[in-house]
């Protein structure tokens, strides 16, 4: 039983919070929440739809005037308190996350700290939504620019980061005076509801934040069609992102999209290979390969190709697969059977097109949705893994000869989220970083995520930036005040 593992079992909420009230679905329907490591049902949440979502939106609209009228310091104190409560409950929140998502407990703890860091950062940055005074072109006028909260916002979030993707959106929204409705992924609602519970304890007022679980189609349609919602922030697949963008066009919402990737990880001959292996393990196998910034394609230069493949396979072979709640686990289960089957099909395709299996390559003996961490050498561009995001623990390793060639191959995708390069050559670092059509480039590191840095992609990987000082802009409107009559008044 999950609640027996928690210091504070009241963090497990199985109702949604709308307008400060914990509620069931109008028709009483529920959805089971399962542990992907065991298949065990660990809870149930309401299957809400259009009407409940509309009520949450209306409550957010009613709560907006009072929330935006508070001073930035007052709002930011609440967000800061929320941060403190996340950290005070880190262990319980991590346990809930691992139970419903599967990632190793150490990664869940790290995600709670990462999620909390967004609240801490925006509780400070929210006080700095500065405007401007622009030098006038006519002495009778003053040109003043003010920043205002955009209004009622909505967040639709994925299962792979059940806490951080919520705080990365709700933190800036609430800090600058917006209100928000969150629709978490159906696979991981308990983390979202636990965050909501802590948000209420922190003093978030009724209606300022609501969490609605249930039918993604119905909730999504209400969010995108309702004119009250002025902004939608989405993290998830490119396919759903495009659909939501199309649906939002009619009401001309401001949009942030954080979508899929096809990250290249480029290792040059002059790289520190051991450092590159360390980075590769993080950039590829974190969250069992299920992050949008996970490496999808390794490109390794000729002279170090064999050495890199051998070292990577040796390190990957040692990774411990198992239930994330067990302390030693490094690779948890895939989120569901469909994800496992996608990984299987990518591996099968790669091996049928000349890939050389160095380790892994099949379902793990533990059964369920566990898959062996895998390394495939001699990858080539005819393989599906070259084009599609695998979203699983598979490393295809491509060989390259020249810098120009690898930049061109790395950019040969519709995606442009994260890229990684390993080289000790300073001028090359600049050339390659500038040549890569990606929103983020890790240089001699496999871990780029940081609340103080701008996270986001180019091309079909999305629109907008989250985290950092840039992440606040998406929740603000710029208003221009033209003040005349200065000389005559
Ligand atoms: N960029 C990223 O970080 C992520 C990328 N992905 C990629 O997408 C693939 C599929 O994963 P999946 O979880 O299905 O991703 P989705 O894009 O389907 O899910 C992300 C969120 O969108 C919701 N959603 C799904 N369909 C709709 C809709 N029609 N209207 C409104 N909301 C909707 C989901 O709800 P619900 O859970 O209820 O379906 C979830 O809350 C992965 O294998 C991976 O390749 C997935 C997650 C994150
Ligand atoms: O994978 C994702 O859905 C985005 C979050 C990843 C990160 O912030 O590191």
Image (tube, rainbow, N blue to C red):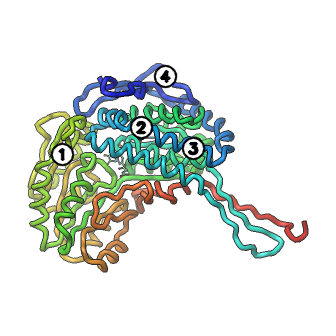
Q: Is residue 153 above or below residue 28?
A: below
Cα separation between marks 1 and 4:
38 Å
Ligand 2 closer than 8 Å to label 2 CB: no
Q: Residues within 10 Å of mark 3 (few under 14, many from 20)?
A: some
Q: Is mark 3 within 8 Å of ligand 2?
A: no
Q: Residue at x 36, y 40 (%)?
A: 159
Q: Earlier in the sequence, mark 2 or mark 4?
A: 4
Q: CA distance from mark 1 to mark 2?
A: 40 Å
Residue 45's x, y, as percent? 41, 26
Circle 3 residue: 77
- Please, which residue is most extreme toward the bottom here? 427
- Mark 4 residue element: loop
Q: How far apart are the alpha carbons under marks 2 and 4?
A: 28 Å
> Looking at the image, which residue is at 45% across and 43% down?
166
Question: Label 1: how many residues lie within 10 Å, few (<14), some (14-19) or many (20+)?
Answer: some
Q: Which residue is mark 2?
A: 88
The image quadrant where one finds the N terminus is: top left
Point out the frontmost of discs 3 and 1: 3
Say which residue appears at 11% left-offset and 60% top-offset: 311
Label whose residue precedes the other's in the sequence (1 or 2): 2
Query: Residue sitting at 48 percent across and 46 percent down?
Result: 119
* N-terminal label among 3 and 2: 3
Residue that carries the numbered disc 4 in the rendered image:
24
Identify the disc placed on residue 344. 1
């Amino acid at each position: 039983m999950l609640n027996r593992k928690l210091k504070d079992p009241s963090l497990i909420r199985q109702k949604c919070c709308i307008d400060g009230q914990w509620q069931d679905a109008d028709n009483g329907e529920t959805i089971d929440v399962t542990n992907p490591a065991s298949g065990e049902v660990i809870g149930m949440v309401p299957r809400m739809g259009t009407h409940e979502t509309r009520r949450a939106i209306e409550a957010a609209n009613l709560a907006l005037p009072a929330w935006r009228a508070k001073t930035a310091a007052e709002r930011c104190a609440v967000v800061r308190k929320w941060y403190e409560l996340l950290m005070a409950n880190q262990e319980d929140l991590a346990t809930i996350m691992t139970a419903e998502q599967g990632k190793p407990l150490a990664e869940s703890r790290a995600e709670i700290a990462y999620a909390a860091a967004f609240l801490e950062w925006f509780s400070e940055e929210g006080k700095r939504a500065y405007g401007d005074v622009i030098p006038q072109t006519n002495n009778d006028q003053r040109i003043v620019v003010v920043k205002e909260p955009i209004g009622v916002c909505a967040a639709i979030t994925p299962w792979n980061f059940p806490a951080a993707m919520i705080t990365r959106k709700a933190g800036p929204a609430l800090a600058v005076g917006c209100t928000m409705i969150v629709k978490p992924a159906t696979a991981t609602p308990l983390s979202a509801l636990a965050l909501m519970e802590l948000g209420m304890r922190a003093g978030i007022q009724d209606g300022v934040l609501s969490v609605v679980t249930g039918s993604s189609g119905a909730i999504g349609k209400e969010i995108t069609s309702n004119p009250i919602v002025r902004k939608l922030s989405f993290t998830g697949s490119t396919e759903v992102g495009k659909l939501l963008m199309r649906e939002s066009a009619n009401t001309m919402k401001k949009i942030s999209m954080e979508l899929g990737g096809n990250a290249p990880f480029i290792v040059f001959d002059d790289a520190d290979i051991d450092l590159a292996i360390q980075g590769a393990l993080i950039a590829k196998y974190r969250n069992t390969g299920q992050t949008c910034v996970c490496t999808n394609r390794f490109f390794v230069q000729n002279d170090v190709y064999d050495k890199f493949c051998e070292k990577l396979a040796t390190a990957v072979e040692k990774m411990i697969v198992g239930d994330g709640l067990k302390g030693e686990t490094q690779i948890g289960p895939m989120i569901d059977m469909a994800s496992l089957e996608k990984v299987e099909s990518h591996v099968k395709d790669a091996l049928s097109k000349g890939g050389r299996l160095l380790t892994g390559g099949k379902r793990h003996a533990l059964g369920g949705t566990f898959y062996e961490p895998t390394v495939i050498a001699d990858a080539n561009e005819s393989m599906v893994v070259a084009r599609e995001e695998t979203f699983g623990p598979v490393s295809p390793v491509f060989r390259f000869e020249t810098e120009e060639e690898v930049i061109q191959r790395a950019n040969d995708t519709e995606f442009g989220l994260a890229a990684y390069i390993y080289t000790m050559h300073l001028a090359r670092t600049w050339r390659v970083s500038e040549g890569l059509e990606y929103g983020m480039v890790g240089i001699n590191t496999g871990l780029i995520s940081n609340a103080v840095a701008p996270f986001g992609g180019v091309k079909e990987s999305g629109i907008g930036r989250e985290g950092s000082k840039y992440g606040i802009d998406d929740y603000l409107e710029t208003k221009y005040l033209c003040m005349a009559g200065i000389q005559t008044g």
